[in-house]
Amino acid sequence: MNEAVGVDVANPPMATDVSWGRPDRRRTLQLALAALWFLDAVLQLQPFMFTRSFGQLMLGPTARGNPGAIAHSITDISRSIGHHSVGANTVFVLVQFLIAFGIAYRPTVRLALAGSVVWSLMVWWLGEGLGGVLAGTASPLTGAPGAVILYAVLAVLLWPTDRGRTEAPFTAARPVGIRAAKVVWFVIWATMAAVALFGSPTRHPSNLLSGMGAGEPGWLAALNHHAADLVAGRGSMVAVIVGVVLVGVALGVFLPAVPARALVAVAVVVGLAVWVVGEDFGTIFSRSATDPNSGPLLVLLAVAYWPIRHAAPGPVVAG
Amino acid sequence: MSEPAWILDFFAAVMLTVSAYCAARLATARRLRRTLHYDVNVAHVAMGMAMAGMLSPPLNLLPDTFWEVCFAGLAAWFTWRSASFVARHGLTGRSSDHVHGVSHYLTHLVMSGSMLYMYVTGVPAAAHNATGIVMGPARGTADFVALPLVFIVVLSVSAVWHTDALTRFTPVRVAAATRTGGATTVVITATGGPEGGRWLAPRLETGCHVAICVAMVFMLVLVL
């Protein structure tokens, strides 16, 4: 394909190399992250988000149970958003579209990833009440420690730079190094395990799941009810099983490649199961979802840690 | 619960612009002897007009049956094109041209299917409700949401994938320029695309595709 344009210039411009490379594994993951931001932005365009109820009924309640200073800040901002619902939501939509297309457009990928970290931390605090971790309302079955914090983590792990002299064993290690990447993985999954084992909600999974079906399609509501019936009266056992599985996943990255790959695969399955059964696809069908929730992000995170088979030892990968 | 009217009007205006621009591309490409995805631009014209009509009832000038036949035809066309491409080149291939070829037809098949889905399930009727700007769940689809969810995922991925490919068409400044007197003539040539030939404004074509994806995902989310 050629588009020829002749121009006369007094001083010739520098020749530029804009050879276009097919997206590698990390770039593909960045594009998946951008697609999730894109979906966030579109979901934010739903009618409910432009009403006062979005601030007061969706954001405000996340203050409950949090320490005073955090709760006050959430209450204040949710009230303010409620009073300026159309303007505030329009800004939210624009920011999320900018992040999505900024990551997708190669010249702006760094700027957009950096912006997404800042935005994610703000939303995690003011929009999700720190994922309910400090409030005691969190459960990994429903998205703890909060979907939006995973956006920030992924932005860092998919940062387009390389650290280290050898080829990274998995994509997430490229920008931060192997040790730091493994610590990040451990902290995320160990936090989920701790919340599952010691938090109250996971010990009452039947309540969590039976309350999920409202507003969902019949088949999904039925799935919720079946799952709730299955775990009814077995809350402690469920909490222990979930906790043990999550601890295993957390430790997986410290194992040799073969068991590590198996446990990362378990992480993918956990992410999908949480998304379908615990999160009802992020309640996307109930017309009140602001994002697809943590399930797809956990899967994306797991893929970023999938051990890579290197054909032979090679030089440092640039860029 | 209704969407703010200005959002629907904004998307309707964008869709009309896209539709008019793609129609202009079709008209000028042959005259300028430039290469074009004719089928894609025809599809963009139709989708832009149809979605503008869904978003803003005064722009809905043609009967729903016309659009249903139109998008069924486009879906059949892109199905045939996809099958022909796979039959000629196989399903797998590592070159970017092969990936582009497969995804190109399949994406437009999904887009045509999405439009057909919205018409068949009665979205335009929903769009006409009450104030004329209300869009609600598609008729009788409360328990049949897997298909639009697939559409949403495919179109979201397509929007970011095509944005990523925008730099593929960034002009390359050829260093070997001819110097004439004090001035230098430099030929700027767009880098490669999926096929040979002189392409008509590939970045704008990509921009139209992304805009249609955004509007379509927006509408599918509203009618889930």
Image (cartoon, coloured by chain):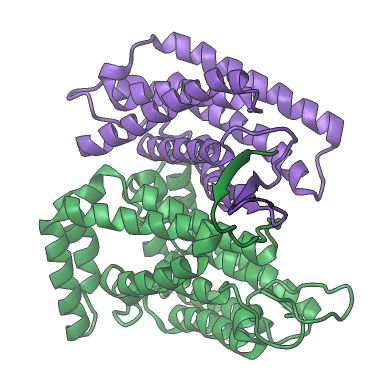
Chain colours: A green, B purple
Relative horizontal placement of residue A227, taking residue B87 as reference (left or right): left
Q: Residue at x 49, y 15 (%)?
A: B68
Image position, residue A84 (x, y; %): 13, 56
Relative horizontal placement of residue A132, taking residue B97 as reference (left or right): left
Vertical comparison of B51 with B62: above or below: below
Observer-nearest of A140 and A232: A140
Whether residue A234 is visible here, answered yes or no, is: no
Relative horizontal placement of residue B131, taking residue A252 as reference (left or right): left
Numbered label tally? 0
Outermost residue, left side = A83
Outermost residue, bottom side = A179
The C terminus of chain B sits in image quarter: top left
Vertical comparison of A263 with A17: above or below: below
Image position, residue A200 (x, y; %): 37, 78
* Residue A215 lies in quadrant: top left
* Residue A268 lies in quadrant: bottom right
Q: Residue at x 18, y 85 (%)?
A: A69
Observer-nearest of A187 and B98: B98
Image position, residue B175 (x, y; %): 69, 57
Whether residue A270 is visible here, answered yes or no, is: yes
Outermost residue, right side = A312
The N terminus of chain B sits in image quarter: top left
Observer-nearest of A142 and A305: A305
Q: Residue at x 63, y 28 (%)?
A: B36
Vertical comparison of A78 with B127: above or below: below
Image position, residue A263 (x, y; %): 69, 75
